[in-house]
Image (cartoon, grey):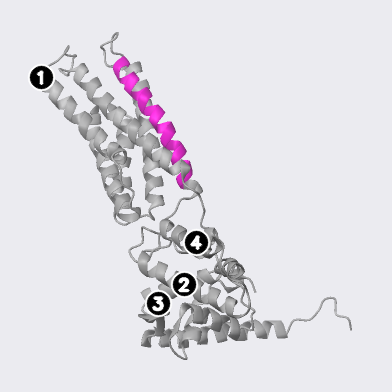
């Protein structure tokens, strides 16, 4: 799936992969890839501004640690982030249900019968 | 060894492009950690180091796209060179030409070389209006280049717009309205320095042009040099002061124009972020 299809949903997806516990950027991207079954094909670098934006919004907090001589930023959800995830997930579910309901009633035209 | 520098070069280039960010060190450390971890994983999977680095950078994204997504500061503005800022650079060159023409016409309509006529004044006023309008476009281009900082954007455009409006009928009041334009460029130039760290003597020329010209106008007038016109003014002081101001604008416009035109442009087209 190309990045354009993810536009508008990446914040929710990043919040979701951070829900189980703190992760650094690389692990967030790996989790997105694994949990989508490699369906999400987007430049890895574009995820970092999302992480920064979520931090700016107060949905995540980050701490620095050192690994293999490199500084590493670890992100974790805040209470506000968890609340936002619950809300956004609910919104998405309503949207997905509505789309499914419409598609379910669709019939091919002309009707082969 | 040369191949092992691919990531270093990429990171150095990114640092150069986002050096205006206050958190540039943190961003660069984070990107570097990601790239090294990716390359290490690929090497562990069997890739040689050079191939691992190439694939790592390919996965991270096209440099132009990455530059774009990292060029959006927390304030939301897009701090980068675009087709618009390049166009503003071209307009700056045009503005420089218009300021030269305005200075020449100032002497022509001053009454020092032939009689003063209303028609000459109208021609001069129209060229001044065109020069100020073009300079306003350049100012807007500079503000666009640094992400429309607030409140500098509104104040600067407002001040410059006053001179644009005034120049259509009151171009003779340039020592007053020129200060508005000078203040607008002063605020914008300070913002440019703070935002992207561009510093140089020439970039202050548009800010200092009209204050310097107004100062010369006041000094020469107070000394009473040259003939006195029917309004009791001093045409030499008027023309000399305006010419100095125009010269400052020419220098400043050419400096800004050269910078904006030569920057690599990458417009913020839709990207794969929410």
Q: Residue at x 17, y 18 (%)?
A: B234
Establish whether labels 2 and 3 are both on one chain: yes
Q: With A23 as the anchor, is B212 left or right in this view?
A: left
Whichever of callouts 4 and 1 sits on the residue coming sooner in the sequence is 4
- Residue B223, numbered circle: 1
- Residue A69, numbered circle: 3
Chain letter of disc 3 in the image: A
Tag 4 near tag 1, CB within 8 Å: no
In the figure, B56 relative to B250: above or below? below
Q: Secondary structure at mark 1?
A: helix
Q: Would you name the residue on which mark 2 appears? A: A48
Whichever of callouts 2 and 3 sits on the residue coming sooner in the sequence is 2
Q: Would you name the residue on which mark 4 appears? A: B10
Q: Residue at x 27, y 47 (%)?
A: B187
Q: With B183 as the anchor, is B226 left or right in this view?
A: left
Spatial CA distance of label 2 from label 1 is: 64 Å
Callout in the foreground (4, 3): 3
Residue B248 in picture, x, y percent from top left: 29, 31
Q: Secondary structure at mark 3?
A: loop
Mark 4 closeness class: few <14, some 14–19, many ≥20 residues within 10 Å = some
Q: Which residues are magenta?
A: B85-108
């Amino acid at each position: 799936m190309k990045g354009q299809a993810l536009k508008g949903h990446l914040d929710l997806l990043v919040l979701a992969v951070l829900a189980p516990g703190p992760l650094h950027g690389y692990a967030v991207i790996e989790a997105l890839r694994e949990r989508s079954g490699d369906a999400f094909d987007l430049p890895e670098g574009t995820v970092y501004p999302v992480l920064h934006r979520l931090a700016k919004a107060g949905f995540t907090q980050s701490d620095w640690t050192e690994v293999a001589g490199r500084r590493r930023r670890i992100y974790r959800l805040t209470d506000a982030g968890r609340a936002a995830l619950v809300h956004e997930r609910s919104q998405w579910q309503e949207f997905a249900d509505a789309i499914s309901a419409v598609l379910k009633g669709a019939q091919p035209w002309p009707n082969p019968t | 060894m040369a191949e092992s520098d691919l990531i270093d070069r990429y990171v150095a280039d990114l640092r150069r492009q986002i050096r205006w960010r206050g958190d540039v060190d943190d961003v660069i450390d984070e990107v570097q950690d990601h790239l090294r971890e990716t390359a290490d994983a690929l090497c562990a999977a069997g890739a040689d180091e050079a191939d691992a680095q190439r694939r790592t950078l390919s996965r991270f994204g096209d440099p132009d796209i990455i530059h774009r997504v990292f060029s959006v500061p927390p304030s939301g503005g897009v701090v980068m060179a675009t087709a618009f800022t390049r166009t503003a650079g071209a307009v700056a060159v045009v503005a420089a030409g218009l300021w030269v023409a305005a200075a020449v016409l100032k002497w022509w309509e001053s009454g020092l070389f032939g009689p003063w006529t209303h028609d000459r004044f109208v021609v001069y006023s129209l060229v001044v209006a065109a020069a100020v309008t073009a300079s306003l476009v350049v100012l807007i281009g500079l503000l666009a280049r640094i992400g429309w900082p607030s409140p500098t954007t509104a104040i600067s455009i407002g001040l410059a717009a006053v001179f644009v409006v005034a120049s259509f009928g009151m171009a003779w009041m340039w020592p007053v309205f020129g200060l508005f334009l000078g203040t607008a460029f002063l605020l914008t130039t300070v913002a440019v320095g703070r935002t992207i760290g561009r510093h140089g003597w020439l970039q202050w020329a548009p800010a200092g042009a009209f204050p310097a010209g107004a100062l010369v106008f006041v000094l020469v007038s107070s000394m009473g040099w040259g003939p006195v016109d029917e309004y009791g003014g001093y045409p030499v002081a008027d023309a000399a002061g305006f010419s100095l101001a125009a010269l400052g604008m020419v220098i400043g416009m050419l400096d800004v124009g050269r910078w904006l035109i030569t920057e690599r442009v990458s417009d913020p087209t839709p990207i794969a972020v929410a």
